[in-house]
Amino acid sequence: MNPKIKRVYMPKIRHIIVMLCFVVILYGVYRAYSTIRSVMTSTGITPAVAYRLLSDHGADLKQTDGFTNILLLGIGGGNHTGADLTDTMMVVSLNQQDRIVSLLSLPRDIWSEFLKDKINSAYHYGEEKKQGGGLILSKSVVEDITGLDIHYAILVDFEQFKEVIDIVGGINVEVPEGFQDDAYPVAGKENADCGGDPTYACRYMTVTFMKGFQYMDGERALQYVRSRHAPGDEGSDFARGQRQQEVIVALKNKLS
């Protein structure tokens, strides 16, 4: 099955950079100077460049044949097992001539011959080698899989994702298909023994989404993009990738 691609018309193509980069940099300001430095290292975009993008003062973007490609990675963070495996892998491709943005979600279980493992492990292996190596290796692996030049990369963990959504006041998302996930992980209970319960039921909760247009704060939006145990098609990585694209578009709409 081919990954789904969503195309979104953008009146000003630089606004998508604001959505993906400037908000993350604002998050860094909100937290601390050390976080700003980390964000600059991750994205390759400094606050000065972000300002010029926001104000249309002409900061040139790296590109190949008129396309600028940004790799968006999401990790769990924290200290639990698999905290640095990329739960989300998405390429945001900006067509600078036609002012069209394409979102390509990459299922995390795609096999990489280069890694001899799934592609969602690239960030983990890169960071094992050296700090900052995770983004470098992730970009190389995605370039190998897609054949695209990846010009920039952004890494966001679950807490950063929630805070970015909350900082902008939440988002409005149209849910195309309702679903219920009875095995959504409870934060902080990933390794709980649940009092000897052999099913480890205390580690999980039920989340339900009804079809239709609805408001989501950071926590609710995270549940929407992270859920992966709903029955049927809504439990697939393809459905989850589609939901992640819907949230990106909703965030873009909030910032437009």
Image (tube, rainbow, N blue to C red):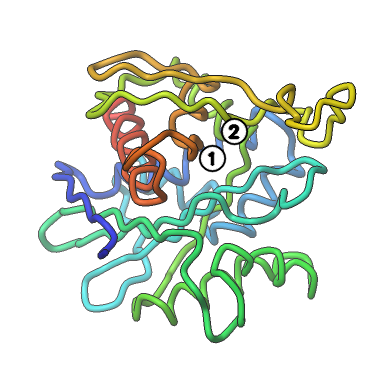
Residue 58: % across, % down: 31, 55
Compared to residue 98, the image places residue 55 above or below, namely: above
Amino acid type for the residue under numbered disc 1: Val
Tag 1, which secondary structure?
helix
Q: Residue at x 63, y 66 (%)?
A: 121
Q: Residue at x 66, y 66 (%)?
A: 134
Q: Residue furthest left?
A: 98
- Disc 2: CA contacts within 10 A as few (<14), some (14-19) or many (>=20): some
Q: Residues within 10 Å of mark 1 (few under 14, many from 20)?
A: many
Q: Which residue is mark 1?
A: 24
- Element carrying mark 2: helix
Image: 246 above or below 107: above
Residue 199, image x and y in percent? 73, 31
Q: Of residues 95 and 201, which is closer to you in this image?
A: 201
Q: Which mark is residue 27?
A: 2
Residue 253 is left or right of residue 237, and the answer is: left
